[in-house]
Image (cartoon, rainbow, N blue to C red):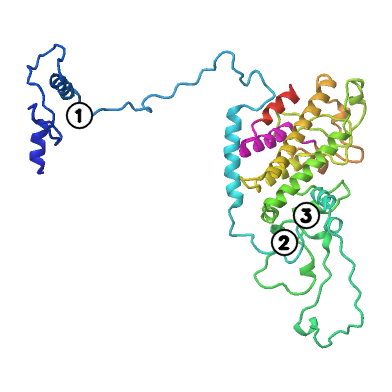
Amino acid sequence: MPPNLKRKQVDDDDDSDPSFGLRQILPVANLPGDFSGEPMDGLQYLFTVRREMRGLPVFTRAPNPYEMPDAAPVAEAGTSGPKEKPFMPSEEWQQTFIRRFKNFQKNVAQPTLNGQRAGWGRKLMPDKKDRDAWWAFLEGAPVSVWDPPRAPKKQKGKQRGGRGERDPAADGWVPVQKNLEGWADEEAALPHPSEPPSVGPSVVSLPEGGAEDAASTPSPAGPPRPREPTPTLLRHIDHRLALHLLMYFTHWLNLHLETLPQDTSAQAPSSTASTPVSTPSKAPAKLPEVAPAKIAHTSPYMPTDGHARWIFALLSRVDAFCSGDEISTLRALARSCLGLLRARRRIDDDSGSGQASEDTMRPPDGVEPTGEGEPSPVQATDLMSESACWMIVSIIVGVWGQRDLWMDAEDMLA
């Protein structure tokens, strides 16, 4: 049908020729245009219907939902809001934190162009099932502690250079006894020459002033610095190893909670101030709003902020889909963090105002205080902060949908 003819048909007001190319089949009554009575039959009814249809607009504009800004939601009376639970993270903070954590997961999973070279045959991490070695590794122990050299096997009746045996000297390769305790845990601390390294002292010696060397070598000022979750280490940790290490952290947290006094109400309030602690309790500069607990107690498995960073990094290596047993491992970790929060809150309540005295804030004997710009290794042994515990719980709740853990948190901390 030509366009001109179609336009004429649309503009035609004849009742017998409906618009939009439709053909009239049923008869329509021929009534005056000002007819206002009740239709007596189907013919008159069709007449009124077509008359109303002609009065409708051809195009209808829908309202734009973005013309006006959205009104701020008003909290209804009687609903539980953040003011009723000041110790719980707000819903807005949880959504923002989970969104950023998922973006961090994607960034960690992406391969990088640099730093993909092998570690020159050295062992980066302890064995998966060696729990004690992993604790020593996290505490910054040298390689000889968490990976001691094995005794060489005795060779019976074998001669050097015999038939079927390769002579290393024939190829110009000479084995070098490397100092395993001096190896760094990060590839960035090692030299990467463009040419193959030659045999000599330069291969064995490490660059002076390496940050990782100081972390793995004890110093006269105190213990070595704990190891941090570097990108090189995270690339060698998969889903199963991450869950296995998270199970270790749950075990260490539970052992630490077992060593804490169960009922501190019977103790005198001044006992905390009179007993020196082995670790300083100065709050980190990055979290001034949360003060760590002042516990006059030593534990072989003291959870620190460094351990919290390891847990955060390991959670980023866990897949979004987990089995029932894996979810149970994550829930146990969240409950251990909630138990640590409850123990710290109980100790803070028993200590009165919760402020540390001079005896609690001073460093242990034999450790000289350092400036604010250079924290001492002892400062890294502060207890895991409340913010770190809430971050771990929020990740497990938000990423893997364990919303019922918030009810456990309310029951434990209320």
Mark identifier at residue 190: 2
**Residue at point 8% right, 40% down?**
4
Sooner in the amino-acid sequence: mark 2 or mark 1? 1
Residue 401 part of the magenta segment: yes
For the residues bearing labels 2 and 1, Cβ distance under 8 angstroms: no
Q: CA distance from mark 3 to mark 2?
A: 25 Å
Which comes before the other along the chain, label 1 or label 3? 1
Occupied quadrant, residue 198 = bottom right
Residue hosting label 1: 58
Point out the image quarter for the C terminus.
top right
The residue labelled by disc 3 is: 128
User: Which amino acid type is shown beneath numbered disc 2?
Assistant: Leu
Residue kind at label 1, given as amino acid type: Val
- Closer to us: 240 or 12: 12
In percent of width and height, residue 116 lies at 64, 61
Residue 117, above or below 374: below
Question: Please, which residue is most extreme toward the bottom here?
Answer: 163
Where residue 6 appears, x then y in whole percent? 11, 38
Q: Is residue 265 left or right of residue 67?
A: right
**Mark earlier in primary sequence (3, 2):** 3
Instruction: Give the residues drawn in magenta, as a range.
Output: 383-403
- Position in image of residue 273 (x %, y %): 89, 25
Asked whether, in this view, residue 279 is left or right of residue 312, the answer is right
Q: Nearer the viewer, mark 2 or mark 1?
A: 1
**Regarding mark 2 in the picture, which secondary structure is present there?**
loop
Q: Residues within 10 Å of mark 1 (few under 14, many from 20)?
A: few
